[in-house]
Image (cartoon, rainbow, N blue to C red):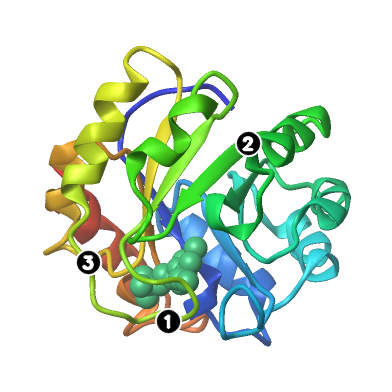
């Protein structure tokens, strides 16, 4: 993975057909996805349950781009090895998930993965100020995590603050939640470079007829200026 700040669209498979992840991933990648965003939920840190490391391992061979694993779980440390073994390129943990985010980030890097930290809408940018020299990605949640298809919460002030704090460091700013062609420009102009989108990518398409995925990805990318 080489670092750059160009806009990257990361479809969240949370909005895909759960019985057909392999084909869904191949379809969105063929239609222009830059990364694949994988939402892991534990029914404890967030209300919903999705899947764990075994499913990540099963879908890994179908991902040709970047496997971006978003852990919405608490506790997190004991599970990191499993996600690294599953082949995650990036593992992101929430700063709210426990008292030891510094240790978690260190563990992720020690496992050979890129390390991300996620901030819920109620958590300020300052919460990651002492982690900037040890992270590869900061995920700014623009919904309260737990479900796809929620309304975008404007966090552009936080994105601007993070962009200033980051300076020249090679750290991606990722936006997760409610991204579509109307909200993408708000966060892209504030300094984000990775846009996660679930419903706005998968709506209107299917594995049998994936052209809508391409149209949707292009519309978000075109709007993100
Ligand atoms: C929310 C997840 C997001 C979500 C995005 O808890 O982390 O990745 O699936 O879905 P949309 O784009 O539908 O808001
Ligand atoms: Zn996510």
- Identify which residue is drawn at 59% across, 27% down: 1
Cα–Cα span, label 1 and label 2? 35 Å
Left or right of 55: which side holds 129?
A: left
Q: Quadrant of the C terminus?
A: top left
- Identify which residue is drawn at 59% across, 85% down: 48
Against 181, is 9 above or below? above
The label nearer to you, 3 versus 1, is: 3
Graded by Cα atoms within 10 Å as few (under 14), some (14 to 19) or many (20 or more), the crowding at tag 1 reads few
The percent position of residue 143, horizontal first and vertical second, equals: 34, 69
The residue to which callout 2 is attached is: 115
- Identify which residue is drawn at 60% across, 23% down: 134
The answer, for residue 174, to whether it is visible in the render is: yes
Q: Is the CB atom of the residue marked by disc 3 within 8 angstroms of ligand 1's nearest atom?
A: no
Graded by Cα atoms within 10 Å as few (under 14), some (14 to 19) or many (20 or more), the crowding at tag 3 reads some
**Of residues 144 and 182, the one drawn nearer to the viewer in this rendering:** 144
The percent position of residue 213, horizontal first and vertical second, equals: 36, 70
- Identify which residue is drawn at 18% across, 48% down: 156
Element at label 2: strand
Q: Mark 3 and 1 residues: CB-CB less than 8 Å, in contact?
A: no
Q: Which mark, residue 209?
A: 1
The residue to which callout 3 is attached is: 153
Against 205, is 23 above or below? above
């Amino acid at each position: 993975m080489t670092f750059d700040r160009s806009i990257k669209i990361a479809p969240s498979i949370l909005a895909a057909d759960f019985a057909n992840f392999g084909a869904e991933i191949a379809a969105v990648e063929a239609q222009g996805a830059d990364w694949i965003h994988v939402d892991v939920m534990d029914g404890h840190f967030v209300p919903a349950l999705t899947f764990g490391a075994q499913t990540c391992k099963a879908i890994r061979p179908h991902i040709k781009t970047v496997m971006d694993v978003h852990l919405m779980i608490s506790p997190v440390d004991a599970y990191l090895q499993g996600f690294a073994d599953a082949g995650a390129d990036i593992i992101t943990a929430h700063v709210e998930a426990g008292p030891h985010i510094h240790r978690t980030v260190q563990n992720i890097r020690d496992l050979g993965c890129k390390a991300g930290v996620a901030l819920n809408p109620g958590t300020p940018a300052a919460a990651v100020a002492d982690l900037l020299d040890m992270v590869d990605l900061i995920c700014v949640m623009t919904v309260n995590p737990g479900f796809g298809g929620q309304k975008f919460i404007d966090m552009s002030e936080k994105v601007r603050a993070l962009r200033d704090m980051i300076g020249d460091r090679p750290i991606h700013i990722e936006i997760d939640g409610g991204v579509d062609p109307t909200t993408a420009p708000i966060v892209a102009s504030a300094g984000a470079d990775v846009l996660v989108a679930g419903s706005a990518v998968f709506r209107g398409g299917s594995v049998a007829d994936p052209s809508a995925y391409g149209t949707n990805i292009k519309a978000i990318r075109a709007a993100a200026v």
